[in-house]
Amino acid sequence: MKIILLFTCLNLLFLNSFSQKTVSCSMETSIGNIQFELYSEKAPLTVANFLKYVDQQLYDGTNFYRVCTPENEKDRTVKIEVIQGGDMPEAKQFEPIPIETTKQTGITHQNGTLSMARDKPNSATSSFFICINNQPELDFAGKRNPDGQGFAAFGRVTKGMKVVKRIQALKENGQYLIEPIGIQSIRRIDK
C-alpha cells in the first residue's frame, strides 16, 4: 500500500512538473495583441505574482506608459530599451515580492523578455517591462540598478514584438508616453 501511494505521489509530481513549465498568456492592447509565455518552474514567485493580477483582471484598463529608447537614454551611462506598463493604484496592488534574480532563475534579459519593474530589491508589485533587444545590464550584476541585483525576468514574448516596437516608437516626453497605450486585457491561454 505504501509503495502504491508513493508511486502515485511521485507520478503526480512528475506530471505536474511537465504540465506547469510554462503558462501562455495573451495581452490585448489598443494597438494590437502580444502573446507571451511565463516560466513558472524557473521563476515561481514572480510568475505567481503576475498571474494573481491577470486572474483577478487587475491589468485590464492599465497602460503601457513608459518607453526607453536610444534617443531618450543617450545621457545615461547605462542605456536600455524597454517598454513599461501595468502600473495601478496602490490600493489594487498586492504586497511586494522577493526578487528572483537572473542568477537564481537563469532567465536573462534578452529581446522580448518580460521582467518586473522595481525600485529597491524586493519591491516589485504590478509594473512590468518588455525588453527590446538584449539588455544584459538588467541581469544580476548588471550596472543599470546600483544595487547590482538586476531585475526579475519571468517570461518571453512569443508573438507581437512588432506591437512592442510600435509602442516604443510612440511620442514621449521624458520617457513617459504622451498618449499611453491601453492594456485592455491579459488572459491565460489554454493549451
Image (spheres, grey):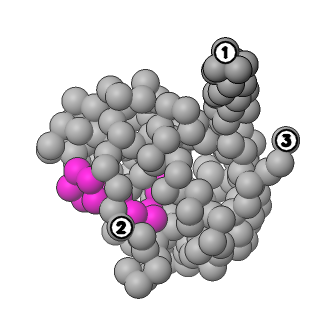
Considering depth in this image, is 11 or 6 the residue closer to the camera? 6
* Residue type, label 1: Ile
* Residue type, label 3: Lys
Q: Residues within 10 Å of mark 3 (few under 14, many from 20)?
A: few
Residue at the (50%, 64%) spot, across then down? 85
Q: Is residue 122 left or right of residue 91?
A: left
Reply above or below: 92 against 177: below
The quadrant where residue 22 appears: top right
Residue farthest to the top?
3
In space, the residues marked 2 and 3 are separated at their CA atoms by: 30 Å
Residue at the (63%, 63%) spot, across then down? 54
The question of residue 66 being in magenta is answered with no
Q: Judge depth for marks 1 and 2 and give the one in front.
A: 1
The question of residue 128 being in magenta is answered with yes
Q: Position of residue 52 (x, y in %)?
A: 56, 62
Q: Is residue 81 left or right of residue 166?
A: left
Of the image marks 1 and 2, the number of the one nearer the N terminus: 1
Considering depth in this image, is 191 or 3 the residue closer to the camera? 3
The residue that label 3 is drawn on is: 191
User: Is label 2 in a helix, a strand or a loop?
Assistant: loop
Of the image marks 1 and 3, the number of the one nearer the N terminus: 1
Q: Position of residue 48 (x, y in %)?
A: 53, 51
Residue 134 visible in the displayed image: no
Considering depth in this image, is 151 or 20 the residue closer to the camera? 20
Q: Position of residue 6 (x, y in %)?
A: 64, 21
User: Is label 1 in a helix, a strand or a loop?
Assistant: helix
Q: Judge depth for marks 1 and 3 and give the one in front.
A: 1
The residue that label 2 is drawn on is: 95
Residue farthest to the right?
191
Q: Residues within 10 Å of mark 1 (few under 14, many from 20)?
A: few
Q: Are marks 2 and 3 in contact (CB under 8 Å)?
A: no
